């Protein structure tokens, strides 16, 4: 859950980040939709709900990439569509696999470099 973790870390301590990039973030739109074991229970989900704290990303450069064949596509698209200001995104053909992640890594690095250069 690296993409989810990156978003959660940036929301938790936004003053420590200038940018956050998430490839195929493991996001669920409700506690009942999560995979077994992803969270301890509904309270754990609510406590770590990246949707609830998304406004904390407003001062950061945000990039979300997710393949259209990824099981997290709908949730990632919802997350990205609700962010203000709008993040950099890529929602092209791809799965939740290393081939997709490698394909978006160069764009993610360019986004982070631009943010660091200011």
Image (spheres, grey):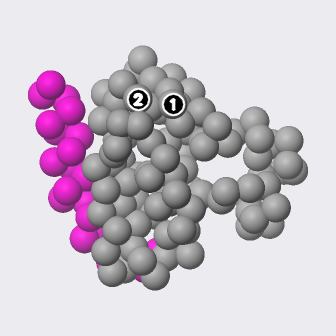
Residue at mark 1: 55
Query: Magenta part of the protein: which range?
Result: 95-118
The residue under the point 50% across, 69% down is 73
The residue under the point 31% across, 74% down is 92
Contact flag, marks 1 and 2 (Cβ < 8 Å)? yes
Question: Can residue 35 be seen at all in this image of the molecule?
Answer: yes
| In the image: residue 45, left or right of residue 22 | right
Badge number at residue 95: none
- Residue 55 or residue 24, whichever sits in front: 55
**Image position of 29 with respect to 70: above or below:** above
- Quarter holding residue 50: top right
Say if the magenta span includes residue 112.
Answer: yes
Label 1, residues with CA under 10 Å away: few <14, some 14-19, many ≥20? some
Q: Which image quadrant: the C terminus? A: top left
Badge number at residue 58: 2
**Image position of 97 with respect to 55: above or below:** below
**Image position of 39 with respect to 48: above or below:** below
* Residue 94: image location, x then y, percent: 37, 79
Q: Which image quadrant: the N terminus? A: bottom right
Say if the magenta span includes residue 110.
Answer: yes
Element carrying mark 2: loop
């Amino acid at each position: 859950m690296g993409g989810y973790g990156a978003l959660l870390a940036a929301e938790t301590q936004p003053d420590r980040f200038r940018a956050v990039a998430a490839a195929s973030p493991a996001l669920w739109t409700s506690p009942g939709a999560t995979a077994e074991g992803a969270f301890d229970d509904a309270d754990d989900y609510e406590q770590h709900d990246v949707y609830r704290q998304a406004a904390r990303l407003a001062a950061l450069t945000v990039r979300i990439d997710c393949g259209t064949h990824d099981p997290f596509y709908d949730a990632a698209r919802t997350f990205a569509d609700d962010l203000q200001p709008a993040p950099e995104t890529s929602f092209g053909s791809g799965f939740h696999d290393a081939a997709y992640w490698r394909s978006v890594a160069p764009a993610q690095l360019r986004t982070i470099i631009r943010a660091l250069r200011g």
